[in-house]
Image (cartoon, coloured by chain):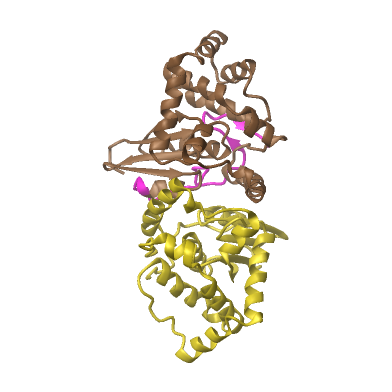
Chain colours: A yellow, B brown
Amino acid sequence: MGPLLRTVELFYDVLSPYSWLGFEVLCRYQNIWNINLQLRPSLIGGIMKDSGNKPPALLPRKGQYMANDIKLLRHHFQIPIQFPKDFFAVIIEKGSLSAMRFLTAVSLEHPEMLEKVSRELWMRVWSRAAEKAGMSAEQAQGLLEKISTPKVKNQLKETTEAACRYGAFGLPITVAHVDGQTHMIFGSDRMELLAYLLGEKWMGPVPPAVNARL
Amino acid sequence: MGPLLRTVELFYDVLSPYSWLGFEVLCRYQNIWNINLQLRPSLIGGIMKDSGNKPPALLPRKGQYMANDIKLLRHHFQIPIQFPKDFFAVIIEKGSLSAMRFLTAVSLEHPEMLEKVSRELWMRVWSRDEDITEPQSILAAAEKAGMSAEQAQGLLEKISTPKVKNQLKETTEAACRYGAFGLPITVAHVDGQTHMIFGSDRMELLAYLLGKREVDGPCASSGECQTLRLPGGSKLFV
């Protein structure tokens, strides 16, 4: 809790529901805790491939558990998250390559928009229809044109590889740089442990200083 | 937060490190929250088989993550947990069948001892890297928990009886029916609803479901835990 700003990286994919939960909690706490939150758009498919892991929902009982879990966490986290009607088509088959390339382009050219655009993409996949993120049509179009450029493709690849080097076997991962040490934390259910490592106070997923209106 | 006591079941296997963490947290909170904690010794191997799942540590990066995770949680939860030197031999190969049958016998005949004996078995395998498969190992744990040698020996003789074998099988199947694909699972019965929560990292969600707004973290106190304090007041220094 000293004056030193600690860097906390969040590697995420909008395809990942728990990434959304971790994202919102960290966004809520970035102005409460003494941290510099760095958002890192990554490709969960790439991490699965590199680690030899598989999406948990492919195991029936895990899929069932996730569906119930998300229903409960919606209320506990105050995030309007709900399973898409055709989960397998949306998540497993369609994937998120263009969306994550788009967010990579945003991170390169308009990083100040990254939080809002990420949120709107989650809203599209994991909630109701998107609202405007405040980006002008020209800005958005310009970025869309960039998603197939080598620069953007490579950046997404590099960020995904960085997550793998931190030991990721899925997403989200939160990487906290504290007192010369690096801690990688998997999932959205370890925020209290993160607080402990940062020497900060954990006040639950909806801290009082934030008016969570989503 | 009403006067009604809510039943919270914990299905666990001493082979499972996260089961130990969940167990200690619930034991700490059972006298703080208005809950009736029911311990359910189960067989994680049986749950894996029935659900088609595999031990996470079999994936190298998950195994590596678990090793680091347990190191951090040791301090955060104030539980003297550490990886056995030969994780695969101890956890994957040797297993916990006799130990869990013994705990099943304890649950049937001396349920008031179940918490302490469970803890002593975890202390053997997940703290001091000691065996839990040999009869002498199980007897040592039972005696450390406060059982007389005669009591412990009597229970040990029952672990191969159909009654005990079937009870363990039934408890494991009950966990599967709740949707378990691993352990620990915590099953909370609240307001006519049943919630199954997997893992030891959802206690805040459990508190939320029980209607608790104040959760004081895994140490269940408003101050910092400076020394390891186990329920019952005994201290452990690490």
A194 relative position to B174: left or right: right
Q: Count every numbered label the image shows and give the total.
A: 0
Q: Position of residue B97 (x, y in %)?
A: 55, 24
Is residue B72 placed above or below A117 in the rendered structure? above
In the displayed image of the protein, which residue is found farthest to the bottom?
Answer: A138
Is residue B56 placed above or below B7 in the rendered structure? below
B130 relative position to B215: left or right: right
The span shown in magenta is B209-238
> Residue drawn 61% across and 61% down?
A47
Using the rendered image of the protein, determine whether residue B131 is visible from the camera's viewpoint.
yes
A87 relative position to B13: left or right: left
> Residue drawn 61% across and 29% down?
B123
Q: Name the image quarter holding residue B149.
A: top right
> Residue drawn 42% across and 31% down?
B173
Q: Quadrant of the N terminus of chain A?
A: bottom right
Is residue A71 placed above or below A116 in the rendered structure? above
> Residue drawn 67% across and 65% down?
A161
Q: Name the image quarter holding residue A110.
A: bottom right
Using the rendered image of the protein, determine whether residue B31 is visible from the camera's viewpoint.
no
Closest to the observer, B95 or A31:
B95
Q: Position of residue B12 (x, y in %)?
A: 49, 33
Q: Quadrant of the C terminus of chain A?
A: bottom left
Closest to the observer, A200 or A73:
A73
Magenta stretch containing residue B61, yes or no?
A: no
